[in-house]
Amino acid sequence: MSGFTWRSASRICVLLLVSSLIVIPLAATILGGFKTDGELRAEPFGLPDVWRTEYYAEIFADTRFWRYLWNSLVISLLTVALTLILGSMAAYAFAQAKFFGSRFLFSYLLLGLMFPFAAAIMPLFLTVRDLGILDTPWGVILPQVAFGLAFSIMFFRTFFKQMPPELFEAARVDGCGYIRFYFYFTLPLSTPILATIAVFVFVQSWNNYLLPLIMLNDRAGYTWTLGAMDYRGEYISSWNRTLAFMTMTLTPAVVFFIAAQKYIVAGLTGGSVKG
């Protein structure tokens, strides 16, 4: 009994330590938007003496903030949608269909996991420019989808492989082909893995800075990461405004992650289909 207690206590301590590494900086960012510059310098992690909401109200009334937020939301949602559609279709083919060279093609796709994004930024820029989608949302969306496919296909294929083969055989007997089985059986049973990949892709796209920096030049098309740097440059001596801006732009990703948390756990621990 004592061993179990010590083991449980050690786990709790580790979880608290790991959680503090995330919660403390996040809390400091949120509280910083309520402080004056003097309070930020004196007590960066402490509570404000007077809770000031004018910085948040100022950003809330700024049209640039909503434009940056909308641009990021459009790019992230389209990236998630295309990654889920293309990744699940490709993984379904690798998991259920038998064709020549499937193993080689799957291994070739997984090489994308080992390819550093920064190393491809120059040829990627030239390709996007030649396609005529430079300085448009698609110049950011399509590269993000391309780099997210290897990750999504690997997770989707592992999940689809766990589905009982008897389910597919019964559907074939009833005259259900690959396409109908994909839409009517595979996707409805894949909610956990769909939510898991959607959250990872959304957060990665939402926080992406390098790709929008290279592909977007017009301020009207800036994402929130570029907008934060632009906002910081305007208020270089006002960290409270910058922290308030960061808090409000990070909120959608945090809310999205919390809302899909139970599906993420289910997707990472084996799926929803029981044999």
Image (cartoon, helix red, strand yellow):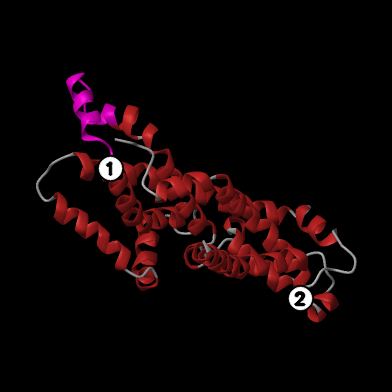
Residue 82 in sight: no
Residue 244 belongs to the span the image colors magenta: no
Q: How many marks?
A: 2
Which amino acid type corresponds to the residue marked 1 in the rendered image? Gln
User: Which residue matches tag 1?
Assistant: 162
Percent coordinates x, y for residue 63 in the rendering: 73, 53
Which amino acid type corresponds to the residue marked 2 in the rendered image? Pro
Check residue 240 in the rendering and tell me which mark sits there, or answer none: none
Residue 174 belongs to the span the image colors magenta: yes
Q: Is residue 10 left or right of residue 233?
A: left
Question: 176 or 243, which lies in front?
Answer: 176
Which residue is drawn at the image coordinates 84% and 59% (left, top)? 53
Residue 162: image quadrant is: top left
- Circle 1 sits in a helix, a strand or a loop, which is it? loop
Which label lies toward us, 2 or 1? 1
Q: Earlier in the sequence, mark 2 or mark 1?
A: 2
Figure check: 15 above or below 161: below
